[in-house]
Image (cartoon, grey):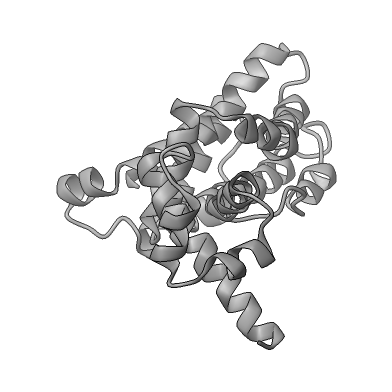
């Protein structure tokens, strides 16, 4: 088996395990269930993963769609302060919000990923705690820094509530594809609809910290998103 075949086998195992974990939880799935669904064998699974917990960790990271350290934080560090230019700060924060929310919603076309994340939110495992520390809390801290650039006198609790607005929208759209499709009559997984979500959420969050809407967004008239 060459490197490409090994990579494909690993991906197939993760995808099969992810679907099963999303439906039944980690404790409700056996290794034999996973290899049967993946069309693999125990030897192949053991080659890539030492145990079921390691495989669950890989599936959860795949569901998150990104590595524990992501480069969108550089946008946060480079954002100006309100004193330098409210318009410049608004443009920078808009770019940061779009980058992170798009990252969260990028895998809506693969339902098991959203379902696994939502399962973890409702019933956190020890592995979820690990990724809270590696991914979610650093993301939250970066968003808090953005809020503090715009509202220097605000409390940390106020900044965190503002930051969690982004996560709240992400959770809703990850879990409500069928409801959105029925209510609006559009494909919630389309790139066009994702763009409207990004416009709408960014406007809400910018206005809540008294920043102007970037000219490009204003020209697009995104209030109706």
Q: Nearer the viewer, residue 113 or 165?
A: 113
Can I make out residue 135 in this image? Answer: yes
Can I make out residue 191 in this image? Answer: no
Q: Quadrant of the N terminus?
A: bottom right
* In the rendered image, the vertical position of residue 48 relative to residue 85, given as above or below: below
Residue at 73% in and 32% down: 133
Q: Nearer the viewer, residue 46 or 204?
A: 46
Give the residue at the far bottom of this rendering: 2
Residue 152, picture quadrant: top right
Residue 23, picture quadrant: top left
Residue at 57% in and 77% down: 8
Q: Position of residue 100 (x, y in %)?
A: 61, 48
Residue 101 horizontal side relative to residue 177, left or right: right
Label count reads 0
Q: Nearer the viewer, residue 215 or 132?
A: 132
Residue 137 horizontal side relative to residue 100, left or right: right
Residue at 35% in and 41% down: 175
Q: Position of residue 91 (x, y in %)?
A: 66, 48
Q: Position of residue 162 (x, y in %)?
A: 58, 24
* In the rendered image, the vertical position of residue 31 relative to residue 6, given as above or below: above
Residue at 47% in and 63% down: 35
Q: Position of residue 149 (x, y in %)?
A: 77, 30
């Amino acid at each position: 088996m060459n490197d490409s075949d090994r990579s494909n086998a690993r991906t197939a195992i993760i995808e099969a395990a992810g679907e099963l974990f999303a439906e039944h939880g980690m404790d409700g799935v056996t290794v034999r269930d996973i290899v049967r669904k993946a069309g693999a064998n125990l030897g192949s699974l053991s080659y890539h993963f030492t145990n079921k917990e390691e495989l669950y960790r890989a599936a959860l990271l795949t569901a998150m769609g990104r590595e524990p350290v992501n480069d969108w934080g550089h946008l946060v560090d480079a954002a100006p302060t309100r004193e330098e230019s409210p318009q410049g700060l608004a443009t920078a924060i808009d770019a940061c919000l779009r980058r992170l929310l798009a990252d969260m919603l990028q895998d809506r076309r693969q339902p098991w990923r959203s379902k696994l994340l939502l399962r973890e939110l409702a019933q956190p495992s020890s592995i979820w705690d690990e990724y809270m520390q590696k991914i979610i809390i650093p993301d939250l801290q970066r968003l808090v820094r953005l809020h503090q650039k715009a509202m220097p006198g605000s409390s940390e609790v106020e900044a965190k509530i503002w930051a969690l607005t982004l996560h709240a929208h992400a959770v809703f759209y990850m879990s409500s594809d069928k409801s959105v499709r029925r209510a609006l009559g559009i494909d919630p997984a389309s790139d066009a609809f994702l763009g409207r979500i990004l416009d709408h959420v960014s406007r809400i969050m910018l206005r809540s910290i008294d920043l102007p809407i970037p000219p490009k967004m204003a020209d697009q008239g995104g209030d109706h998103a």
